[in-house]
């Protein structure tokens, strides 16, 4: 059993704040500042270049990848860290297209995060007639996996609605038609149990600054199924994905397995921050997270529907079809969210009118849910959101 009282104590949670935005940026582990201070002074400061060997910096992308593998049901040794999620999407797409040279369609859906679609658009532009991006409604994905599809590019949990795709079913369907699958786990890793090996997913990518609490700018991860790992030919052939980077040979030879998905120098300070978060995750069972996350989301939905009739549920009502976030639509949703934030209840807003609330059992309790809804109710009943400072849009929503 996961001890959520213990996990909550491991995070710095600002006084007076109820943080329902861990789906965008998780809170800081209390151990992080001291760990970074020690790393900077003892490792960078004293060891300088020798730190790559002495402190194992070069091995971090693989060792942290293994700790994340457990959380996403990946085989050990098949996840590697580095770069940002957008880059990892590009790498996975290029690799998948190479594995299906006789097919040209990338199938995605309108619920996907813009950066995933932009990366696909950029690759298609580069490849000319070789590739085509087809974007359909989320509910139409299954019917559109036709024999010309090379790869599906799907985000398992929709960033706006929280709607969850059926990874196992869609992967089986795609493979039946000879297509490959890329699963974006941005809103899955640390939010819901994922079983990449069980689903026989081909590729998966994700970020670590959302539910995994790795900090702003934390590195992304990529998974390549064992059956493809030694076959794919990396489009971003960086020196650290080379079989022997320190031979400095003129020609590229891909490294073993997922190692070849490394590109350049890893962000060591960010990896070290992520390590402090993974020290907490190592003591967490994703089945417990799921059970508690559903309980918190159900509690929130029931209270909001009872107290705030102006808000309309935008997420699936069925918990089994929903990730770990709840979205409501509201006229003036932006201003309502700003008023909530001013009162210490932090969610976020996605255009045109979606208010998003993330529930992370590692540090959110039923008391927080009750308090958040009581603040929301007060703001709505008194129209306290109807002030110039709340109506003015900021750069980051
Ligand atoms: C958060 C998110 C991203 C962000 O990509 P970065 O390169 O890390 O900025 C991409 N895709 C999805 C589905 C996301 O939710």
Image (spheres, helix red, strand yellow):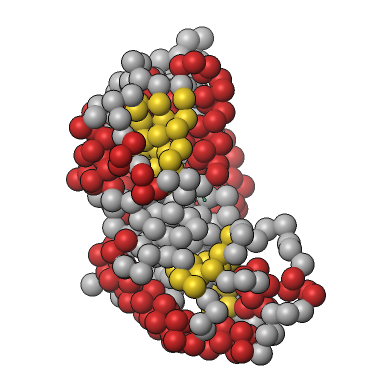
Vertical relation: 264 (above or below) 100: below
Is residue 138 left or right of 128 when viewed as pictured?
A: left
Residue 193: give x, y in percent of width and height.
29, 58
Is residue 100 left or right of 135 when viewed as pictured?
A: left
What residue appears at the point 59 percent right and 40 percent down from the top-left corner? 48
Vertical relation: 96 (above or below) 343: above
What residue appears at the point 54 percent right and 68 percent down from the top-left corner? 329
The quadrant holding residue 47 is top right
The answer to whether one can see residue 214 in this image is no
In front: 197, or 396? Answer: 396
What residue appears at the point 58 percent right and 78 percent down from the top-left corner? 345
Q: Quadrant of the N terminus?
A: bottom left
Residue 248: give x, y in percent of width and height.
50, 15
Vertical relation: 368 (above or below) 80: below
Residue 322: give x, y in percent of width and height.
36, 62
The quadrant holding residue 3 is bottom left
Q: How many labels, in total?
A: 0
The quadrant holding residue 37 is bottom right
The answer to whether one can see residue 377 in this image is yes
In front: 70, or 158? Answer: 158
Q: Quadrant of the C terminus?
A: bottom right
In front: 321, or 199? Answer: 321
Residue 308: give x, y in percent of width and height.
52, 83
Is residue 92 left or right of 272 when viewed as pictured?
A: left
What residue appears at the point 47 percent right and 30 percent down from the top-left corner? 133
Single out the residue that lies furthest toward the right: 388
């Amino acid at each position: 059993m996961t001890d959520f009282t213990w996990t909550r104590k491991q995070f710095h949670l600002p006084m007076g704040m109820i943080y329902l935005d861990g789906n965008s940026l998780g809170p800081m582990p209390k151990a992080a500042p001291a760990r970074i201070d020690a790393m900077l002074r003892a490792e960078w400061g004293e060891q300088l270049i020798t730190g790559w060997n002495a402190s194992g910096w070069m091995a971090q992308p693989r060792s942290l990848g293994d700790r994340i593998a457990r959380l996403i049901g990946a085989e050990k040794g098949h996840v590697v860290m580095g770069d940002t999620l957008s880059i990892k999407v590009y790498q996975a797409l290029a690799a998948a297209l190479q594995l299906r040279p006789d097919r040209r369609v990338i199938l995605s859906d309108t619920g996907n995060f813009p950066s995933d679609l932009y990366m696909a658009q950029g690759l298609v532009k580069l490849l000319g007639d070789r590739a085509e991006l087809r974007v359909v409604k989320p509910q139409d994905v299954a019917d559109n996996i036709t024999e010309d599809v090379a790869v599906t590019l799907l985000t398992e949990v929709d960033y706006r609605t929280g709607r969850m795709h059926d990874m196992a079913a869609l992967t089986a369907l795609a493979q039946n038609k000879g297509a490959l699958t890329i699963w974006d786990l941005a809103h899955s890793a640390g939010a819901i149990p994922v079983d990449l090996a069980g689903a026989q997913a081909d590729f998966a990518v994700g970020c670590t600054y959302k539910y995994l609490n790795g900090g702003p700018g934390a590195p992304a991860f990529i998974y390549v199924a064992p059956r493809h790992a030694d076959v794919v030919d990396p489009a971003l052939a960086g020196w650290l994905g080379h079989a022997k980077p320190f031979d400095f040979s003129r020609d590229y030879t891909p490294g073993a397995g997922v190692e070849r998905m490394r590109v350049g120098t890893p962000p060591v300070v960010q990896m070290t921050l992520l390590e402090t978060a993974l020290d907490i995750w190592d003591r967490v069972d994703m089945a417990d997270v799921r059970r508690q996350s559903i309980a918190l989301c159900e509690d929130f939905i029931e209270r909001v529907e009872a107290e705030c009739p102006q808000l309309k549920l935008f997420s699936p009502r069925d918990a089994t079809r929903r990730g770990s976030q709840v979205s409501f639509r509201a006229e003036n949703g932006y201003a309502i969210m700003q008023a909530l934030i001013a009162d210490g209840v932090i969610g976020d807003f996605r255009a045109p009118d979606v208010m998003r609330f993330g529930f992370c059992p590692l540090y959110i309790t039923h008391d927080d849910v009750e308090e958040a809804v009581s603040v929301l109710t007060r703001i709505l009943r008194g129209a306290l959101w109807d002030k110039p400072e709340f109506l003015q849009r900021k750069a980051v929503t």
